[in-house]
Image (cartoon, grey):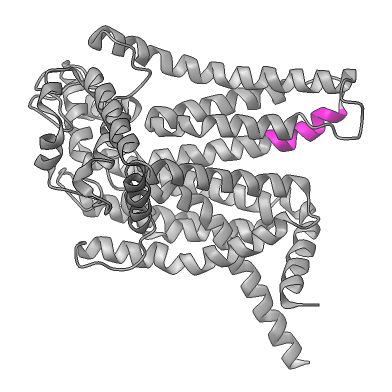
Amino acid sequence: MSLNDQVITSVSSQINQMEPARKLATASTKKVLVAIFIIAILLRLASAIYQGNTVVPLPGIYDQISYDGLARRVVEGHGFSFAEGHWPATLAGEPTAHWSYLYTLYLATIYALIGPQPLVARLIQAVVAGILHIWLAWRIGQRMFGPTTGLIAAGLSAVYIYFFYYAGGLITETFYIISILWTFDATMRLLSSSHTEKRSSSVSSSYWRLWLELGLAIGVTVLLRQVFLMFVPFLFVWLWWNLSQSPQPIPWRSRWTNRLQWSVLKGLLTAASVVFVMIVPWTARNYLVFHTFVPLNTNAGFAFFWGNHPVYGTNFVPLLEPETYHSLIPNELLGLNEAELDRALFKQAVKYITADPPRFALLSISRAIEYFKFWPSSDSSLISNIARVGSFGICLPFILYGFWISTKLLCHSNPPQQRSHLLLIYIFVVVYTAIHLSSWALIRYRLPIDALLLIVAALGLENLGKNYFSLRRKRNV
């Protein structure tokens, strides 16, 4: 048997034997998990305290200046606007929909209750992230590969420098990553629940509560970052395919199959309805202030336009001087309001792409270099270089090894749910990466896929550890 087959056989047998252990963590597992929680919270609190009670530009989290200023304006009764002209092209006192409504309201609520105290918002965010991010990473990891992988995934997530650095920043990244993990956790629980429902003659209330929870998780996610909406159709197709499959070979047009598919369809409509209800108030607000249809935020057109402007040629530069971005906007468009300008810039970006498709292709390839950068750069600050090398740089070999193992698992006879979960993660990685490689690629935009790839890295680390101890035992025999 080749080494390749030995690895797959070993991992497959280990995973198949772990099913009973997945239901309840052992006492030792709980102790380790508590220790991981403590480490995660302390690191995130340290990051929050380091960033302090003032809001200043810091590497990778410059947007916190915008969120802090916007939250203060909301508390003062001026609505979602800025006192002075602001990024991207918002005039003083004019309404904006460029920034996450949900995260702005988070800051505004804290400022309204205790005054403008950024450190308090940072500390609350740090504690929430230290608990929920780690808990969800553990849940997803242990559900896919067993409790050991879950613990390793939680541990990696706890000490991943990017995660505890951004947990102190007043930007959407931390809550956005948590809500994505929540969405995946709810989706995987829904798949597990469906196997029980398929064997019963009726659909339980807990099954429908899971659909409502999934809709709530997706709604929170898109209110933090609307880009997640582009992945939702892929998620729904995955759910339809996996949940509408019959547990046993039966005729396609049987009553059982029809009932099953109708149940899945109602579930998808339920989740979609929850998302719709969460978005529509902001759509109505946007129509009132911009007098045009804007589903949620006005940032896709700006990002797509700037990310594909001919100024780059075929070599993408992640950050230009702030004033450069404004100068790239055609003068004839500057009289439009923010929503109209966002739409006009999107159309202009499409013209750039269709006029020179080869340039777009080469530009997108160049964005991949920035998106997956793991080495230090003289153009970056010390903090950025330490975070880049100490996070993605260290974990990348284990991610690649875990990816190799998991890809092999997809091709072997393993539990169907495991294959489905793996496929869902890789669909997200591919779709989310493609979105940013076609528009604007920054390292912090990659962090949501890092959160899931660390689970794959945990699989690789667990396998390496077991192989190492297995070799030691053989040598001692």
User: Where, by quadrant of the figure, is residue 103 drawn?
Assistant: top left
As rendered, which of 442 and 263 lies closer to the eye? 442
**Residue at position x 36%, y 14% in the image:** 283
Q: Is residue 379 above or below residue 277?
A: below
Residue 80 x/y as whole percent? 22, 20
Residue 249 x/y as whole percent? 91, 34
Residue 257 x/y as whole percent? 84, 23
User: Where, by quadrant of the figure, is residue 111 drawn?
Assistant: top left
Quadrant of the image for the N terminus? bottom right
Within the magenta stretch, is there residue 135? no
Magenta segment: 190-199
**Residue at position x 67%, y 49% in the image:** 143
**Residue at position x 67%, y 51% in the image:** 144
Can residue 160 be seen in the rendering of this structure? Answer: yes
User: Where, by quadrant of the figure, is residue 372 drawn?
Assistant: bottom left
Does the magenta stretch mainly form a helix, a strand or a loop? helix
Looking at the image, residue 245 sits to the left or right of residue 75; the answer is right
Within the magenta stretch, is there residue 194? yes
Looking at the image, residue 287 sits to the left or right of residue 83; the answer is right
As rendered, which of 438 and 270 lies closer to the eye? 438
Residue at the bottom extreme, as displayed: 476
Residue at the right extreme, as displayed: 250
